[in-house]
Amino acid sequence: MLETGTTVPDLALEDTAGRPVDLADYRGADHVLLYFARSTTCPVCNLHLKDLTGRAAELADAGVRLLVVVPEGRAEAAAWQAKRALPFPVVTGRRGSPHEAVGLVRKVFGALQQSGSLLIDRDGVIRHAHAATMPVNSYDRKGITQALSRLG
């Protein structure tokens, strides 16, 4: 997993409409919180997203854009986003798995996709990095809140 204090690499992401999403476009303007869901069918990840949706105003007030990253393809991600009425962009990988690109690999004999989050400041520096193999541990609400309080 990428580490706090390092610069986020260029990730090959795209939104559910197939448009490229470049994290560099947020530099100087917005902080970015990437929430890496284990899958669109993960009930625990969906609960975490419900909490993040409830925190939308708090995140916006802190100048944070949330991007929900899923390992599935665009069509499945778009259907899931619509079904859940997510107010945040959902992104997938343009080339390969976005999860693997940040070090979130499949564990437990390749059956369980790691999930987690990255909070990236306006300068592209990672201010919070969290990874978990078990979905119940993937959303570090307290750690994200503490990192948000330290953003300028």
Image (spheres, grey):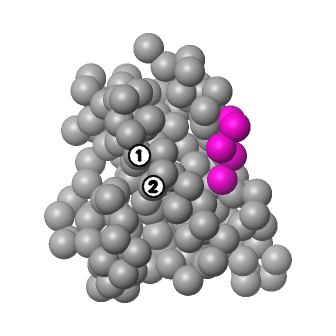
Residue 53's tag is: 2
User: Does residue 26 belong to the magenta stretch?
Assistant: no
Placement of 147 over or under 104, stated as above or below:
above
Residue 143's x, y, as percent? Answer: 68, 35
| Identity of the residue drawn at 41% across and 27% down | 62
Residue 47's x, y, as percent? Answer: 60, 66
Quarter of the figure with residue 76: bottom left
Q: Residues within 10 Å of mark 1 (few under 14, many from 20)?
A: some
| Identity of the residue drawn at 56% across and 70% down | 46
Look at the numbered disc 1 and give the secondary structure of its residue.
helix
**Span colored in magenta:** 139-143
Residue 56's tag is: 1
In-image side of 88 versus 40 (left or right): left
**Do residues under tags 1 and 2 come within 8 Å of each other at their CB atoms?**
yes
User: Does residue 142 belong to the magenta stretch?
Assistant: yes
Residue 25's x, y, as percent? Answer: 22, 38
Placement of 129 over or under 84, stated as above or below:
above
Look at the numbered disc 2 and give the secondary structure of its residue.
helix
| Identity of the residue drawn at 52% across and 62% down | 50
User: Closest to the observer: 57 or 108?
Assistant: 57
Pick the quarter of the image with the C terminus: top left
Look at label 2 and name its amino acid: Thr
User: Closest to the observer: 81 or 3?
Assistant: 81
